[in-house]
Amino acid sequence: MAYTTIIGMEVHVALNTKTKMFCPCTNNPESEEPNSQICDVCTGQPGSLPTPNKEAIISTIKVGKALGCSILPVSKFDRKQYFYPDLPKGYQISQYDEPIAKNGKIELQFILEKNIRNTAIIGIERVHLEEDTAKLTHKNDKTLVDFNRSGLPLVEIVTKPDFMSATEAKKYCQELQTLLRYLGVSDAHMEKGQMRCEANISVQTAGTFEIVDGVVKPLHNVALNPKVELKNLNSFKSVERGIIFETERQISLLEQNQTWTQQTRGWDEAKQETVLQRKKGGAADYRYFPEPDIPPFHPENIAGTISLPELPLQKQKRFHSEYGFSYADSHILTQQKALANFTESVMSEITDWLHTMPEVKGSTEIIREQKMQKIARLTGTWLSNKLLGLLNEQKKSIEDFAVSPENMAELIALIYTNKINAMNAQKILVQMVESSNDLDPTHIMEEKGYGMVQDTQKITEIVTDVINTYPKQVAEYQSGKEALLPFFIGMVMKASEGTVDPKIAEETLKNMLTN
Ligand SMILES: [Zn+2]
């Protein structure tokens, strides 16, 4: 039997607003003192009235706009009724049929090789705002409740069931995290619970359904298999592994002619399997109804006054077209806003410098273009590969890198103009990463003697030494065995620790060996 897996994602994002969603309490869930950030509203005292947080509404509109959604002219809050000890009012204020934004999409790019990519488009069903619950801690046989988290603003982003694989779902979560950080609305750390991912998964027999406008519809009167909501996906890796496991579990049930009811399961990281949490009802069971204490509001009007920064994917595409970085480098260099800004400053320095070089100044557009491409490849590699590699190794971020774009550009210029070889440039970069000062690479190069030997007399000395050390090979070369030339070049490289330009070494050797 052939099967198809239907996958949709629901992600809750904790907004980094100053205050809570409906009261003036400080948004500080990490506060060490439990129940220190609370008031009548966020502990659900009778008679207390909620006042919506405008900053949270603006952040949600930003998320909706960035995901290409329509921002609704009228939106409202609703009560979602259910009982649990972490919900003091007996209902959660959420949004039901009139969310802030709906019908958007996100483009996922998979870089297959440096310059080859694949694209997937995922539909966004809705973006709405709701309040978080309190935090329960189970200790021995007691359960403790901390209301510091109660009433914090959460944005929920629901996709259409458009994912074709667990890999796409993981990629979506990664791209969404980058987007949220670019917008500055959330730090979106998964391990801190600032971004909580859930997957809706149902395996169907192929050909029994169609998806119309994001809604799964059965064909030929078959009953579709119910969806499983998968929670506890606390890392990108667990998003991928959890979906793969659940897909295989459902397939094996179908193979044994069994089915399941709609349910919530949790990903058990230790066991690497999904476990049943509860059998679930539909929306009807929550008895949603409009929140009577908050009037409807007008997100579309507010949206008109909000402008978005350049988004990660736009930046990635521009880095490729404007600077000529490969797709892979463009992607890596735009994953963090600070790194993207640093890269742009380095490129600006390098472009200025290139244009002052005498051989480029009066030259044609084509030569300038070729030089720019060479520089882009070099810069792309030195930033995305060498610099990020060293920073990761030392568990540092680009914000910890004390070196200015000017000095980073200078290091790349030294490599480009052959004043230093890659090995010694790497040694300088290590020092630059380790230091808390803005180190000048030329200064280090001169101080440590890392530079390429420019002095002809010095080069002649090194070559003479090599010739004197290998008289037998010299005789063979002079009697016609020219294949020995690379051997001599290698010896010059070794003697100079790579600081003689191989081309100059070759010329000098040819001259001196034939004379
Ligand atoms: Zn409060």
Image (cartoon, helix red, strand yellow):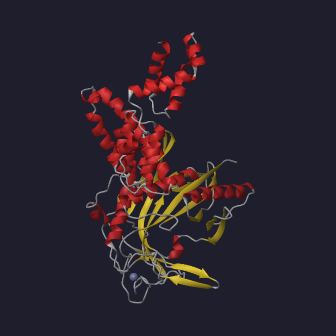
Q: Is 28 left, or right, of 135 in this rendering?
A: left
Q: Residue at x 33, y 42 (%)?
A: 347
In the rendered image, the vertical position of residue 384 relative to residue 143, given as above or below: above
In the rendered image, the vertical position of residue 121 relative to residue 495, given as above or below: below
Q: Residue at x 56, y 51 (%)?
A: 167
Q: Residue furthest bottom?
A: 46
Q: Residue at x 54, y 63 (%)?
A: 198
In the rendered image, the vertical position of residue 460 relative to residue 445, given as above or below: above
Quadrant position of residue 356:
top left
- Give the x, y percent position of residue 127: 42, 63
Choose between 105 and 115: the one closer to the eye. 115
Choose between 109 and 485: the one closer to the eye. 485
Q: Is 137 left, or right, of 257 in this rendering?
A: left
- Give the x, y percent position of residue 94: 43, 73
Quadrant position of residue 362:
top left
In the rendered image, the vertical position of residue 53 relative to residue 258, given as above or below: below
Choose between 433 and 149: the one closer to the eye. 433
Q: Residue furthest top?
A: 479
Choose between 432 and 111: the one closer to the eye. 432
- Give the x, y percent position of residue 244: 63, 55
Q: Is residue 20 visible?
A: yes
Q: Residue furthest right?
A: 256
Q: Is 431 left, or right, of 6 in this rendering?
A: left
Ligand 1 falls in quadrant: bottom left
